[in-house]
Image (spheres, rainbow, N blue to C red):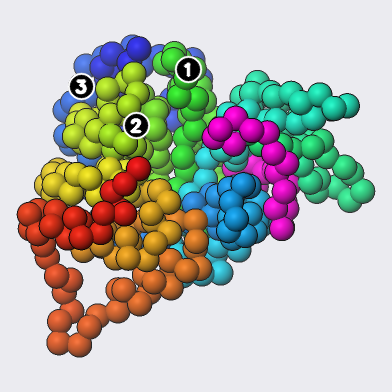
Amino acid sequence: MALKAVHVSDVPNLDQVPENASLALYSTRFSKAVEMNRVPYKIPKFLVVGHRGNGMNILTSADQRMKAIKENSIMSFNYAAKFPIDFIEFDVQVTKDDCPVIFHDNFIISEDNGVIFEKRVTELCLSEFLCYGPQKEAGKIGKSLLRKTKDGKIVNWNVEKDDSLCTLKDAFQQVEPSLGFNIELKFDDHIVYQEDYLIHVLQAILKVVFGYAQDRPIIFSSFQPDAALLVRKLQSNYPVFFLTNGGTDIFYDVRRNSLEEAIKVCLEGGLQGIVSEVKGIFRNPGAVTKIKDANLSLLTYGKLNNVGEAVHMQQLMGVEGVIVDLVKEISDVVSDMIKPSKGDESNPQFSEKELSFLLKLIPQLIQE
């Protein structure tokens, strides 16, 4: 069930909200405040963003690059920083004792005496969360860390270069400071969250961000529409993007089911941009124009962003950046792509009709 429209107080934007706050207290001027304070987020160049650092782990893939370095780890983040990228993207959840940690899956899966079990990340305290996988303390052995594949199979989380689990604070303190953070606010698609819970979780994350970000560029993003809207209300320092599958998957919450709905969410809530599954853009190229006309920024994610030609096509379409797994390869492609050509420093522009025609020439880009 979606949250009802909520309102801020006479103060248009809040850097922090009191611990016991309820948005019901902020009851009069939200739409006016949004109108006054939504400054479009201008992206100065075509961005390359490392997905979960140097790329997500696909443990069943034949491509060794997909299991080279443990995803969402300090090692992966700093390895990605060696290449000419602008941001890394990672997933943040909050433990039972209010510590923001970096982990993608909703559950930790492990094995004890031959019995496989899973525990929800948000129901663990920090010390228990950190005891899985490699340990920082010399000589200490962590509990096994397994993973469930999309088809439900349980596999060992084996990568060539492993690393310990980490917190959001660790990332701020240990990752190359010039590298921007795209912080995905991670929630379970199958849970209906209460407003007070979302506020509590977001406050815990914002406390760490405000305490340690310094001059590091930050973008917040979330698939959870209410979390995206709330983090926009709770702070004005950093842009907030709405994550969407762009209609490639269908959800109970209609706000998640199309790029047009994503535009609506952004405009009504004062968000600064959209991050779409790339297939959603290729299937609906006309949406790019609508997004630009709404003064919203547009990034994409998805496996097709590991294909240089698909990235180049997006740049021509007006997409402003890509979240990628093959950081080295795609950062090289983009570096070559954005070099000005002699005699013509501008990129060719295509009409919606021309773009649709071009997309029909590369059907593999729009297949399931």
- Please name whichever residue, 130 or 210, is drawn nearer the observer in this view of the structure: 130
Q: Which residue is at 39% across, 32% downward?
A: 223
Q: Farthest residue in the right direction?
A: 139
Q: Identify the amino acid type marked 3.
A: Arg
Residue depth check, mark 3 versus mark 1: number of the one nearer the observer:
1
Mark 3 Cα within 10 Å, few/some/many (few <14, many 20+)? some
For the residue labelled by badge 1, is the local secondary structure a helix, a strand or a loop?
loop
| Magenta stretch encompasses residue 213 | no
Label 1 sits on residue: 191
Give percent across and percent down for residue 30. 22, 24
Q: Which residue is mark 3?
A: 29
Q: Quadrant of residue 151?
A: top right
Looking at the figure, which quarter contains the N terminus? top left
Q: Amino acid at mark 2?
A: Asp
Percent x, y for residue 359?
A: 20, 56
Residue 70 in view in this figure: yes
101 horizontally vs 282: left or right: right
Number of the label disc, if any, that sits on residue 249: 2
Residue 262: image x %, image y %?
Answer: 25, 34
Start and end of the magenta stretch?
149-175
Q: Position of residue 275 (x, y in %)?
A: 33, 44
- Give above or below for 159 relative to 342: above
Kindly identify the residue that appears in the image at 81 percent across and 45 percent down. Answer: 135
Relative to 207, say whether 23 is above or below: above
Horizontally, residue 324 falls left or right of residue 154, namely left
Tell me which residue sits at (16%, 74%) in the image. 346
Q: Secondary structure at mark 3?
A: loop
Calculate the distance from the C-alpha at mark 1 to the C-alpha at mark 2. 17 Å
Q: Is residue 295 visible?
A: no
Query: Does residue 292 appear left or right of residue 57 in this picture?
Result: left
- Name the amino acid type tagged 1: Ile
